Amino acid sequence: MKRACVLLALVLAACSPAPVARAPATSLPSIVSLNPCTDAILAEVADPVQILAISAWSHDPASSSMDPAQARRFRATNGSVEEVLALRPDLIVGGTFTPPATRSAFARLGWRLEELGIAATVEESIAQVRHLATLTGHPERGEALVARITDALAKAAPPPGASPVQTVLWEPGGIVPGDDTLVADVMRRAGLANFSASKGMKQADYLPLERLLADPPELVLTAGNPRAEENRLLGHPALARLTKTRREAVDPSLLYCGGPTIIRAARRFAEVRGT
């Protein structure tokens, strides 16, 4: 009987799927990230071997806030419970838009899910950087990233006494950011005033071309491909008639996430302010 049990155990082991590669056994947690914004921060503060997977969004240049070449260093996941559990992470990091069924499944199975909300200010984003760095076991890397963010914002600040440049940020689809958003906070720190918000428009409100032509700002920042159907307003020839309004393009990847994205956004906003 004892010999038969040993043989059965060997057969079952041979039929088991190959184990997923994991980080070496240390006190540092292995992590799966389900959110493109946390992907970008974790890539800065965690050891690469700790990151078992990032979100598939970060492998798509149209939705990533990090360098696609950097993103492709990591496995991607669509965030299904089955995918994540196959990776067996110590920690799952996501946003507050995690589907309730997925959240409930992780809870039932006893997996730790850390959810981060959408940062609305630079301070909130910095707090998230520090939180994620602490979770990875590398708080000093979080402080180094915070120092880089702070330095970039200081360098992007306008000269003392300079008037803010009245600016419309036209996002893909013709919408504008509200004043209580991270991108508006970074714009403000770089000397760009959120013109649409001063006119009473809120987050994701649609700005018609006619309204922009009737009340133009000093600067229009367009994000996205003007040839795309949903962005056709961005390249409308009527905009060329606004002789006192400058137009500049910004990369859409600068608009939605914090952490290291703030550094690139601050530099670009300072650049277009001084053009």
Image (cartoon, rainbow, N blue to C red):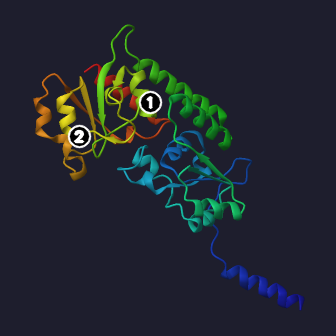
Query: At 75% across and 82% down in the image, what residue appears?
Result: 10
Quarter of the image for residue 112 reads bottom right
Q: Position of residue 210 (x, y in %)?
A: 18, 37
Query: At 62% across and 41% down in the image, what residue appears?
Result: 132
Few, some or many residues within 10 Å of mark 2 (<14, 14–19, 20+): few
Q: Position of residue 207 (x, y in %)?
A: 27, 39
Between the C-alphas of marks 1 and 2, the distance is: 30 Å
* Left or right relative to 166: residue 59: right
Q: Which mark is residue 263?
A: 1
Residue 86's place in the image compared with 259, above or below, is below
Which residue lies under the disc numbered 2? 208
Tag 1's secondary structure? helix
Residue 118's place in the image compared with 55, above or below, is above
Residue closer to the observer: 7 or 241: 241
Query: At 69% across and 59% down in the image, what residue appears?
Result: 111
Q: Position of residue 73 (x, y in %)?
A: 48, 52
Tag 2's secondary structure? loop
Most distant residue in the top direction: 161
Quarter of the image for residue 3 reads bottom right
Few, some or many residues within 10 Å of mark 1 (<14, 14–19, 20+): many
Residue 8's place in the image compared with 101, above or below, is below
- Quadrant for the N terminus in the image: bottom right
Q: Which mark is residue 76?
A: none
The amino acid type found where label 1 is placed reads Ile
**Closer to the eye: label 1 or 2:** 2
Residue closer to the observer: 137 or 98: 98
Most distant residue in the right direction: 2
Q: Counting residues from the N terminus, which is met first, the one under dot 1 or under dot 2?
A: 2
The amino acid type found where label 2 is placed reads Pro
- The total number of labels drawn is 2
